[in-house]
C-alpha cells in the first residue's frame, strides 16, 4: 500500500499569521500520525514563512512514523538535516523567492552537484529523494545522481485530470516504468487531492509514497482532520 505523508506547512502558515503557537505544528504532527498518516512532511524555507527552523527540531522527537524534510540543499539546510536525521530528505530546486515548488531538477545539468549532496546524506543513513518532472531523461539522470527515490511533480497531472485523465497520467506511467527498471523507488506530490488521487495511485502500482499538504489541510477545514486523513488513506 502506498504511504501517505501529510505535509503540515499550512498549519504553520495559519499559526504565523497571528503569532503565538496556535495552531501548534507539533500537536498537528502528533494528531496526523494518530489519525493514520504514515509520515510527516515539512518544507522549511529560508524566510520561515511557514515552518521555522525551531519547528524542524521540535517535531523530530514526536515522530512515530517517518519524517520527511523537503528543501533546497543550501549549506544551512544540509547542516540542519544532518543534525536532525530524518528518515528521508527530499531535494527541491526552489530558490528562496519561490512561492511553492513549481519545477523539478534538471538531473543532467546538476548531476555532479546532486550526487555530492546525496552522498553526504547517505553517509548519515538518510534516505534521499529528488523532485523531478515526468520526463524520461530526468529519470535516467536521477539514477546517475545515485538517489534512492524520485518524487514525481504531479501538478501537470492534476491540472489536466478533469479534461483527459488518461492523457494526463500517461507520462507518469512511462516514467515510473523507467524508474522501476532502473531500481528507483517512487514518491509523488503536488496538487494531489480527493478528486484525483485514487486514479493516480491505481495507475502507478509501484508508488511508495505520496506527500500531500495544501489540499488535505484545506479539506480538513470542512471535514475534520481525522476524517480527511482516513479519506485519503482509503483512496490509496
Image: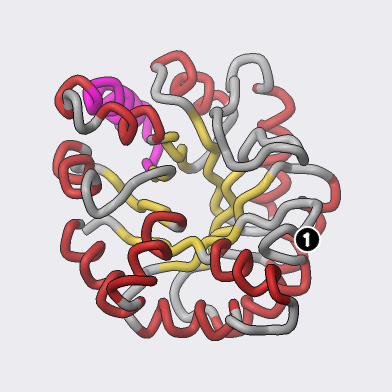
Left or right, 235 with respect to 38, comes to left
Q: Residues within 10 Å of mark 1 (few under 14, many from 20)?
A: some
Instruction: Between residue 212 and residue 132, name the one nearer to us.
Output: 212
Residue 125's quadrant in the figure? Answer: bottom right
Outermost residue to the right: 75
Q: Which residues are magenta?
A: 168-186
Q: Is residue 100 placed above or below 31 in the rendered structure?
A: above
Residue 200's quadrant in the figure? Answer: top left
Residue 144's quadrant in the figure? Answer: top right
Whether residue 125 is visible, yes or no, is: yes
Quadrant showing the C terminus? bottom left
Q: Position of residue 201 (x, y in %)?
A: 21, 45
- List the residue tagged with mark 1: 80
Q: Is residue 42 placed above or below 187 in the rendered structure?
A: below
Q: Position of residue 168 (x, y in %)?
A: 24, 25
Magenta segment, prevailing SS (helix, strand or loop): helix
Q: Residue at x 85, y 46 (%)?
A: 75
Q: Residue at x 70, y 70 (%)?
A: 16
Instruction: Between residue 62 and residue 99, name the one nearer to us.
Output: 99
Amino acid at each position: 500500500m502506498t504511504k501517505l505523508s501529510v505535509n503540515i506547512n499550512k498549519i504553520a502558515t495559519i499559526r504565523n499569521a497571528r503569532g503565538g503557537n496556535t495552531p501548534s505544528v507539533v500537536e498537528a504532527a502528533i494528531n496526523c500520525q494518530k489519525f493514520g498518516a504514515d509520515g510527516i512532511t515539512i518544507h522549511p524555507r529560508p524566510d520561515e514563512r511557514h515552518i521555522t527552523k525551531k519547528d524542524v527540531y521540535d517535531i523530530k522527537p514526536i515522530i512515530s512514523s517517518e519524517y520527511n524534510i523537503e528543501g533546497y540543499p543550501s549549506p544551512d539546510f544540509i547542516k540542519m538535516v544532518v543534525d536532525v536525521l530524518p528518515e528521508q530528505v527530499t531535494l527541491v530546486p526552489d530558490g528562496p523567492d519561490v512561492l511553492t515548488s513549481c519545477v523539478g531538477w534538471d538531473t543532467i545539468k546538476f548531476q555532479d552537484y546532486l550526487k555530492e549532496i546525496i552522498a553526504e546524506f547517505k553517509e548519515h543513513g538518510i534516505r534521499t529523494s529528488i523532485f523531478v518532472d515526468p520526463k524520461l531523461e530526468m529519470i535516467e539522470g536521477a539514477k546517475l545522481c545515485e538517489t534512492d527515490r524520485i518524487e514525481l511533480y504531479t501538478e501537470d497531472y492534476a491540472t489536466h485530470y478533469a479534461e483527459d485523465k488518461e492523457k494526463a497520467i500517461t507520462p507518469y506511467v512511462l516514467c515510473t516504468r523507467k524508474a522501476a527498471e532502473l531500481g528507483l523507488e517512487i514518491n509523488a506530490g503536488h496538487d494531489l487531492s480527493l478528486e484525483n488521487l485514487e486514479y493516480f495511485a491505481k495507475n502507478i502500482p509501484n508508488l511508495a509514497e505520496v506527500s500531500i499538504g495544501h489540499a488535505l489541510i484545506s479539506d480538513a477545514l470542512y471535514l475534520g482532520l481525522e476524517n480527511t486523513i482516513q479519506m485519503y488513506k482509503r483512496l490509496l
